[in-house]
Image (tube, grey):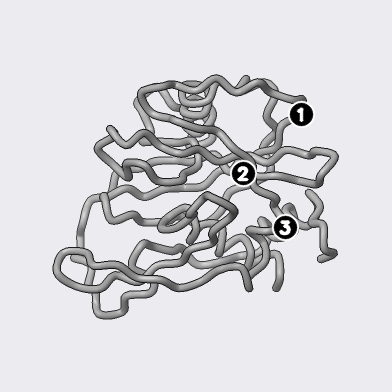
């Protein structure tokens, strides 16, 4: 891969088999219960080709939300009965959260499932904008929409392993900060998986 990744780099990576991931990847002492029920969900890893190179669209979640308040995230959420596929789920959630036009997003592929501490099985859906969008935040969920260079989050060396106390013990996780944005947890883990596949 060159210094500036291309959509073809992403497509090739998405065609490469990879294992699923979880919020507990870096915590081998955590034993997840057998037979646990996970709720299906999807996020939209939305890319945009710009004069600066390909960028990733991310959001900062409202501090008032029940799950992951104030964190950096992809647009997304749980699959509803009306969502025929997880791609449909990701498009619907992005439209609701940041006002994207589903017809202006092309499907590129799917990343491996990711299990979250909140009991969701998230399937990241990767898409690219076919024309510029003026994002409209859903104020109750999103406080900011911003872009990060794809090259930054595809640089494995830009990731760090950090930790914080969680349920009485230290929980370790990936983080890939960018400027004032602290990208960590599930979002960083999903991006880390993509970065590893692109660099393989």
Please provide percent x and percent y for residue 102.
61, 23
What residue is drawn where x is 54% and y is 28%? 91
Position of 162 with respect to 95 (left or right) is: left
Q: Which mark is residue 130?
A: 1
Gap in angstroms between the C-alphas marked 2 and 1: 13 Å
Q: Earlier in the sequence, mark 2 or mark 3?
A: 2
Please provide percent x and percent y for residue 177.
54, 59
Q: Secondary structure at mark 1?
A: loop
Please provide percent x and percent y for residue 49.
78, 39
Gap in angstroms between the C-alphas marked 3 and 1: 20 Å
Residue found farthest to the front:
180
Label pair 2/1, CB-CB below 8 angstroms:
no
Q: Earlier in the sequence, mark 3 or mark 1?
A: 1
Gap in angstroms between the C-alphas marked 2 and 3: 16 Å
Around disc 1, counting alpha carbons within 10 Å, would you say few (fewer than 14), some (14 to 19), or many (20 or more)?
Answer: few
Residue receiving disc 2: 126
Position of 131 with respect to 89 (left or right) is: right
Please provide percent x and percent y for residue 80.
36, 28
> Toward the viewer: 143 or 48?
143
What residue is drawn where x is 48% and y is 37%? 86
Q: Which quadrant would residue 55 be assigned to in this image?
A: top right
Q: Secondary structure at mark 2?
A: strand
Around disc 3, counting alpha carbons within 10 Å, would you say few (fewer than 14), some (14 to 19), or many (20 or more)?
Answer: many
Label pair 2/3, CB-CB below 8 angstroms:
no
Q: Which mark is residue 151?
A: 3
Where 73 sits versus 64, above or below?
below
């Amino acid at each position: 891969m060159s210094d500036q990744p291309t959509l073809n780099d992403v497509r090739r990576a998405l065609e490469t088999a990879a294992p699923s991931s979880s919020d507990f990847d870096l915590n081998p002492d955590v034993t997840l219960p057998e037979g646990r029920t996970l709720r299906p969900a999807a996020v939209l890893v939305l890319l945009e080709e710009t004069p600066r190179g390909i960028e990733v669209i991310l959001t900062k979640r409202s501090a008032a939300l029940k799950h992951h308040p104030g964190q950096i995230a992809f647009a997304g959420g749980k699959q509803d009965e009306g969502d025929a596929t997880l791609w449909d789920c990701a498009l619907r959630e992005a439209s609701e959260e940041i006002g994207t036009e589903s017809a202006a997003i092309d499907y590129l592929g799917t990343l491996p499932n990711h299990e979250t501490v909140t009991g969701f099985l998230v399937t990241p859906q990767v898409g690219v904008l076919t024309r510029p969008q003026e994002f409209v935040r859903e104020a109750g969920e999103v406080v900011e929409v911003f872009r990060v260079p794809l090259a930054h989050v595809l640089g494995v060396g830009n990731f760090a392993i950090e930790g914080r106390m969680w349920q009485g013990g230290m929980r370790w996780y990936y983080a890939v900060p960018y400027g004032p944005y602290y990208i960590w947890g599930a979002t960083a883990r999903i991006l880390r998986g993509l970065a590893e596949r692109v660099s393989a």
